[in-house]
Image (tube, helix red, strand yellow):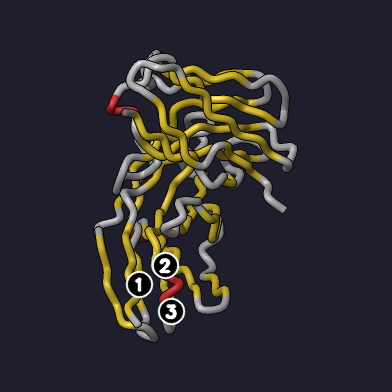
Amino acid sequence: DAMVIQNPRYQVTQFGKPVTLSCSQTLNHNVMYWYQQKSSQAPKLLFHYYDKDFNNEADTPDNFQSRRPNTSFCFLDIRSPGLGDAAMYLCATSRDNQKETQYFGPGTRLLVL
Amino acid sequence: AQKVTQAQTEISVVEKEDVTLDCVYETRDTTYYLFWYKQPPSGELVFLIRRNSFDEQNEISGRYSWNFQKSTSSFNFTITASQVVDSAVYFCALSGLVEVNDMRFGAGTRLTVKP
């Protein structure tokens, strides 16, 4: 029944060690999003894919990259995680553009040691 | 610029009390969409409702109801007869058509329902 799946749910990495978070969806939605959410804050959009078109938010650090090899999967790569990158990372999908509802996965909580 | 304000950072009520979560928004768009999401301790954002700017009809879904007032740019959320399971952070969000896929979240309101 799960529609937006994120793996792993918890990820521990070392300072500076690249890490990849994954997201998959069974909804066949065109748009996939990655959000960063720090403790007691609202989710912050990092970037999104409309189909294969990548859209980066202006203030997303270069340390964050994303790949969408097909409709179902999207990856978040953090090239050199810093302590400040410890957060919950949420993946979401929507059928079409921003007027559509976004459906979120359970999130991956990243810990940087 | 689009902006969502949830002035209530934290609310605590006793079970069975009614509680209203406030949401005030700003946008220059004439067409826009408003959302409420629930985030329980598990972390997943659960979609509750979506309204477009042309539909001011209030909505009721079980114990949940929403009051959309365009005149005051508010989209408030009321839980009737609250339950412990309602304890969560609730986010109001706004999406317009000026920028593609730009949805702005409010800061969230943490609701604690005590038994």
Q: Amino acid at mark 3?
A: Gln
What SS does tag 2 mark?
strand
Compared with B50, B103 (above or below) is: above
Identity of the residue drawn at 52% across and 24% down: A20
In this rendering, do the residues under marks 1 and 2 share a single chain? yes
Identity of the residue drawn at 41% across and 76% down: B84
- Residue B20: assigned label: 1
Q: Are marks 1 and 3 in contact (CB under 8 Å)?
A: no
Q: Residues within 10 Å of mark 2 (few under 14, many from 20)?
A: many
- Residue A45: assigned label: none
Q: Amino acid at mark 2?
A: Phe
- Asked whether B59 or A101 is in front, the reply is A101
Q: Position of residue B57 (x, y in %)?
A: 54, 68
- Asked whether B82 or B70 is in front, the reply is B82
Q: Is residue B28 visible?
A: no
In space, the residues marked 3 and 2 are separated at their CA atoms by 15 Å
In space, the residues marked 1 and 2 are separated at their CA atoms by 6 Å
Which mark lies nearer to you, 1 or 3?
A: 3
**Quadrant (top left/top right/bottom left/bottom right) for the C terminus of chain B:** bottom left
Q: Position of residue B74 (x, y in %)?
A: 37, 60
Q: Position of residue B42 (x, y in %)?
A: 46, 55
Q: Which residue is mark 3?
A: B83
- Residue B77: assigned label: 2
- Asked whether A39 or A31 is in front, the reply is A39
What SS does tag 3 mark?
loop
Q: In this image, A110 relative to B101: left or right?
A: left
Q: On the image, which quarter does residue B6 sit in?
A: bottom left
